Image (cartoon, rainbow, N blue to C red):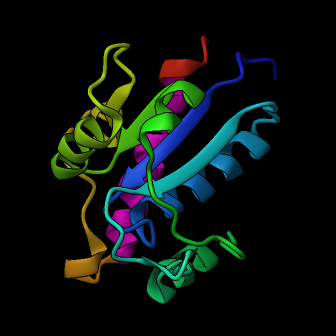
Amino acid sequence: MTAKPYRIMFVCHGNICRSPMAEIILRAMLKERRITGWTVASSATSTEEIWNGRGNPVYPPAAAELSAHGLSCGGKRAVQLKRDDYEDYDLFVGMDSANIRNMHRILGGDPDGKIRRLMDYTDRGGDVADPWYSERFDIAYRDIRDGCEGLLDALIPQ
């Protein structure tokens, strides 16, 4: 399938649960639909999971949830969102309202309207459930999958 090649950065607090799950889920959806040329990445608004210049890997329960759906997060490590990223991506998709506030701060605003919230691409709206506190990685997976499907529907003309 031919589609405009988008550059999408998913963002959450630590880049060890929700945003890497979104990155991996969207990549799998693109592969399944035979869409190529897109750049899909993820990053953190905090530095908590990034130390000694090397980020932590995907949180084991998040990795296990991905694996339960046949997806691998091998090699993914937390990275920090940087102001310079604004020019390199078409969309910055946050998992919750706090991510959106922090993205505006880090990126120096949003003059081109690139910052969005993932669940706004669904009919449910709101925030992606945070499994760090709830331990419900299945619910986070469902929210992220639904959000990624809505995002693709919004970006690719039918």
In this picture, residue 16 sits left or right of residue 36: left
Q: Residue at x 80, y 18 (%)?
A: 2
User: Would you identify the image quadrant in which residue 134 lies?
Assistant: bottom left
Question: Residue 130: in sight, yes or no?
Answer: yes
**Hey, which residue is sitting farthest bottom in the picture?**
60
Q: Position of residue 86 (x, y in %)?
A: 47, 30
User: Would you identify the image quadrant in which residue 70 lies?
Assistant: bottom right
User: Above or below — where is 126 with respect to 122?
Assistant: below
The magenta stretch spans residue 120: no
Q: Which residues are magenta?
A: 137-153
User: Above or below — where is 101 with respect to 61?
Assistant: above
- On the rendered image, what quadrant is the C terminus found in? top right
Q: Residue at x 59, y 30 (%)?
A: 88
Q: Residue at x 30, y 22 (%)?
A: 110
Most common secondary structure along the magenta stretch:
helix
Q: Position of residue 132 (x, y in %)?
A: 28, 78
In this picture, residue 108 sits left or right of residue 91: left
Work out whether residue 65 or residue 158 is closer to the camera in this orientation and state it. Answer: 65
- On the rendered image, what quadrant is the N terminus found in? top right
